[in-house]
Image (cartoon, helix red, strand yellow):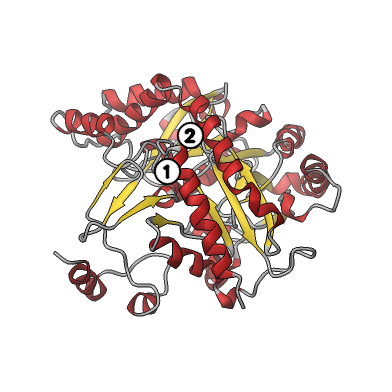
Amino acid sequence: MRNADLVARGLKSVWHPCTQMKDHEGTLPLVPIKRGEGVWLEDFESNRYIDAVSSWWVNLFGHANPRINAAIQEQIGQLEHVILAGFTHEPVVSLSERLIEVTPEGLNKCFYADNGSSAIEAALKMSFHYWKNQGKPGKKNFVNLSNSYHGETLGALALGDVALYKDTYQPLLMEVMTAPSPDAFNKEPGETDEEYALRQFEAMDALLAEKHDEICAVVVEPLIQCAGGMRMHHPIYHTKLREACDKYGVHLIADEIAVGFGRTGTLFACEQSGITPDFMCLSKGLTAGYLPLSVVLTTDTVYNAFYDDYETLKAFLHSHSYTGNPIGCAVALATLDIFRDDNVIENNKRLSTCMADSVAHLADHPNVGDIRQHGMTLAVEMVKNKATKEPFPWQERRGIRVYQHALTRQSLLRPLGNVVYFMPPYVITEEQIRHLAQVATEGIEIAVRD
């Protein structure tokens, strides 16, 4: 099969996500992929691309990983799926035990769904229902951060604050309260990331002090607002937020769907703030990019508020058909085995240092407004004016030029607007990182030309 053959067939039948389909008929032709191995994706004509974005931030240990493949093959010969209501199976029990072991202390119960948005939806309902069971039905609102993103289903979308995704559907969404983000991109000259985060927290603290009687929970993406342009902030913000939530009787929901499993330099981003949230939502890296699976971890305190006789109607009657799928759980267990056996977090420190060094020369570029990094996530933001950080008009789509150039240089770099970022699988080599940095530098030069 030729690339063009599959593209032609696909354009007749497949509606692709997060894209204007008209682009695929002209300026942005689809890239058909036949196979993957390690960091590489390969098309039908033997062209190869380094998957620098981990196929939407999910792939941790490379495509066609032998250990994960073996786990799937072993599990599929035993049990492919079974209802989790009234039944159980060994993979879901073992995975729950392992997750409780590695996540922040106090998260002792696991509730499963099948994607990140579904996990957020479950956490929202759990929080509201908890307060209802506690005799506080007036607590029914949620707080988010500006520039946040938590998924595409209606509840999750309501918790986001990225206009591109949200504005169209605003009439369908519940109203939420928004506090200003601690995003360090907006700090004053001479101000540290920590100082700015503390200053921004004052507004959140004031909001909780005034409205806590009607607030169920605050929902945050610890350290990195990924879909919001890979904007980053200091962990002190979440340390203070945990203290405030405890003070005012408000839940803290940590959306670690994109930032969990080593992306920020620790296994979970919350570790860097020294906190345990009331709910932690995990997906993406949970199965190393193989299968849809998500989980909400919560505390005994939350769980016990639902534990009662059936007649009290306090049970959490929420479900998904593929909840706790055994094959997905087997993959997640294999993923955790790799973290346990291969010294992944320490190895990532070496790779993240290489990433930082490889783009350090861009700090003085006249159209680079910021280079930021947490662990294995690094972002370079192109701006029209370096001094004022004035952005390029979004209509110019400068980032797409980087994407198009990268494809000619064996690289998949899919920018977020004017932000070029690296979020590669952890099996990437230093040589491959330096290649990506060179490709990104070339692409930025092309993108910023008038």
Q: Quadrant of the C terminus?
A: bottom right
* Amino acid of disc 1: Lys
**Mark sitting on residue 356:** none
Determine which quarter of the picture holds residue 336: top left
Query: Quick check: can you spot residue 144?
Result: no
Label 1 crowd (10 A; few <14 / some 14-19 / many >=20): many
Name the residue at 25% across, 32% down. 66
Along the line of sight, the residue nearer the viewer: 388 or 205 = 388
The residue to which callout 1 is attached is 284
Residue at the right extreme of this rendering: 190
132 lies left or right of 12: right
Kindly check if marks 1 and 2 are in contact, taking CB atoms under 8 A apart as contact.
Answer: yes
Q: Quadrant of the N terminus?
A: bottom left
Identity of the residue drawn at 49% across and 27% down: 347
Q: How many marks?
A: 2
- CA gap between label 1 and label 2 equals 9 Å
Q: Up-down: is 304 above or below 409?
A: above
Q: Which mark is residue 261?
A: 2
Q: Quadrant of residue 146?
A: bottom right
Q: Position of residue 275 (x, y in %)?
A: 65, 28
Question: Going by the image, does 299 lie left or right of 404?
Answer: right
